[in-house]
Image (tube, helix red, strand yellow):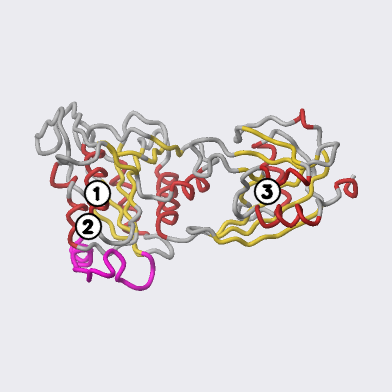
Amino acid sequence: MHESDADRLGEKANSTSRHRCHVGEPRILVTAFPPFSDFETNVSQSVLERLHVDGIDGLDVVTWMLSVDEAGSGAVAAEIRAGIEVDGVIHLGLAARRTGISLERIARNRYSMTEPDNSGRLQESGSIVLGGPETLETTAPLHILDEEFEHDTDVQWSDDAGGYVCNETIYRTLNELQASSGPALPAIFVHLPPESEVPLEDQVAAVIRIANCLVTRPRYEVAAALLFDDQGRILSCRRPNGDAWGGWWEFPGGKINPGEDAPVALLRELEEELRISPEPREKVAHIDYDYDDRSVSLQIWNCGSIEPTSITLVEHDSARWLSRDELLQVKWLPADLPIIEKWSQEGLPEPSLLR
């Protein structure tokens, strides 16, 4: 760590504002490792060096190179014990045999080292923290990361952080956070593939997006489709198990990307989710909703009637066509519910006007 960063992180916080007693831009701690074993480079170090020089717009970025040994694995945990003053932690490490960027969901309380670390330590078995939980889950916002990377083929969730210093590092960090009495601090380990698999620029960009997901409140512009069958019923789709909102029902659709207008974004989403290409013709509702960790501005567009057999579910695990009397029989996402309740009382829009 650079001396100025170490001084800032080492400052003691009072007991009522642990982790967040600073003011100004949200502060994110990003760590990485130098080369280890027979590797001449470590992509996590390359990403860290780029962030140290360029920073991240709107964030106060603290960068820290960890040693590839037991001391390095516990360095951030020790800072947490001392009252670290950051709003989020991202650990970066190399996954030489992976082809994409892995967001590690789980850390395991076990050693399973197949080669020595940089200190010569070879811990083939045993617990990382005696008496600690068998597994610990990332404290990063899962559903925000899900939304951010839902269409990125180079980024995926992983439930196996390995048995080397990477897993040891995130386990020690999460274990210390669990023991902390302060506010919840989002922390995650991100395994990065070699640059031959994903270019360095793309990896830097992904880490910047992860950092923003951890320490800023996102606002999403979303377009959703009101679709009818020939009986005047509307389509609702259920998010699958494993999704952060698994089991909840929604209008099909998704985020509006920068530079897109709502109809273009909605058509793209419907082609991806349902393999259909209806025409979004009229905006029938606009709802602003604040979740605990994000804000959503939802536009609902009437896309008229379609043939139910034309739908292929790609991202949902079930679909239902609902009449006005059936609207409240499923558990709608909170952002969708206000308009559903209104239509349940006042009646559905008329699809025939759009034919």
Q: Secondary structure at mark 1?
A: helix
Would you say the residues marked 3 and 2 are in contact, meaning their CB atoms lie under 8 Å apart?
A: no
Q: Amino acid at mark 2?
A: Ile
What numbered label is drawn on residue 173?
A: 1
Dot 1 or dot 3, earlier in sequence: 1
Q: Nearer the viewer, mark 1 or mark 3?
A: 1
Q: CA distance from mark 2 to mark 1?
A: 8 Å
Q: Amino acid at mark 1?
A: Thr
Q: CA distance from mark 3 to mark 2?
A: 42 Å
User: Can you give x and y, in whole percent of width and height, for residue 343 in the image?
Assistant: 76, 54
Instruction: Tell whether 111 sits left or right of 16.
Output: left
Task: Choose between 119 and 86: the one closer to the eye.
Answer: 86
The residue at 60%/49% (across/down) is 333
Q: Amino acid at mark 3?
A: Ala
Q: Secondary structure at mark 3?
A: helix
What numbered label is drawn on residue 265?
A: 3
Task: Choose between 43 and 327: the one closer to the eye.
Answer: 327
Instruction: Tell whether 154 sits left or right of 130.
Output: right
Q: Nearer the viewer, mark 3 or mark 2?
A: 2
| 239 drawn magenta | no
Q: Give the position of the C terminus as an image quadrant.
A: top right
For disc 3, the neighbor class at 10 Å (few under 14, some 14 to 19, many from 20) is many
Would you say the residues marked 1 and 3 are in contact, meaning their CB atoms lie under 8 Å apart?
A: no
Vertical order, 3 against 142 (above or below)? below
Residue 5 sits in which quadrant? Answer: bottom left
Vertical order, 3 against 258 (above or below)? below
Magenta highlight range: 1-26
| 13 drawn magenta | yes
What numbered label is drawn on residue 80?
A: 2
Q: CA distance from mark 1 to mark 3?
A: 39 Å
